[in-house]
Amino acid sequence: MLGGIGGSENDIQEYSKAMSLVMMILPWFLVPMLGKHAFKRYFPSGIFISFVVLLVNFIAKKRRWWRWYEAFSPKVTWVIPFTWGPFLVGSMWILKWTYGDFFRYMLLNVMVDGMFTYGLGYYLQKLHIFSLVKMKKIQLMYMFMVDALLLYAFTFLKEKILVK
């Protein structure tokens, strides 16, 4: 527990570890609601885009586009629980709700990514989870749109290959 206002460094680190575990695990409780068929159909796409995001984050760290703060250790930042928790599970839900209607898919992605970039980003920075460094918010939105296109294209190609 944080000791009053501006808790000690150890309190903050322990809080950060606990919150990152919650962030990574909690979304997985929604997976059974996806249904077995949707999970089997969209899980490979979620894994694909999660690895793409980790690769982009590796590049972003080198180029200082943004910063994910330490979650467990200097080598394990908040990008790990975020990617393998809400991002992966959220990607599967977005595909379940919108795959087959590209316009709806892109619209939902713009809305979700916009909420992250222009709403949640402020709070993530204040909580020392994530902050932009050399990248502007609009550039981050463009990058999110490229990710959304890659996710849809991967899913489309996977379905075309598996159908044949």
Image (cartoon, rainbow, N blue to C red):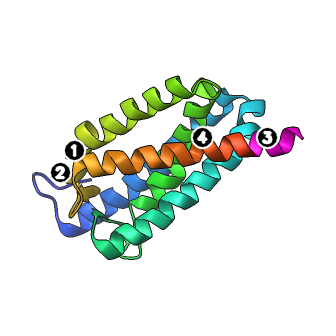
Give the SS element for disc 3.
helix
- Residue 135 is one of the magenta-drawn residues: no
- Residue type at mark 1: give it: Tyr
Relative horizontal placement of residue 142, taking residue 131 as reference (left or right):
right
Secondary structure mostly taken by the magenta-highlighted segment of the chain: helix
Q: Position of residue 61 (x, y in %)?
A: 34, 71
- Residue 162 is one of the magenta-drawn residues: yes
The Cα–Cα distance between marks 2 and 3, rounded to whole angstroms, is 44 Å
Eye-nearest disc, 2 or 3: 3
Q: Position of residue 40 (x, y in %)?
A: 76, 40
The part of the chain drawn in magenta is 158-164
Q: Quadrant of residue 102?
A: top right
Residue lying furthest right:
164
The Cα–Cα distance between marks 4 and 3, rounded to whole angstroms, is 12 Å
Task: Specify few, some or many for label 3: CA neighbours under 10 Å numbering under 14, 14-19, or 20 or more.
Answer: few
* Looking at the image, residue 101 lies above or below residue 40: above
- Residue type at mark 4: give it: Tyr
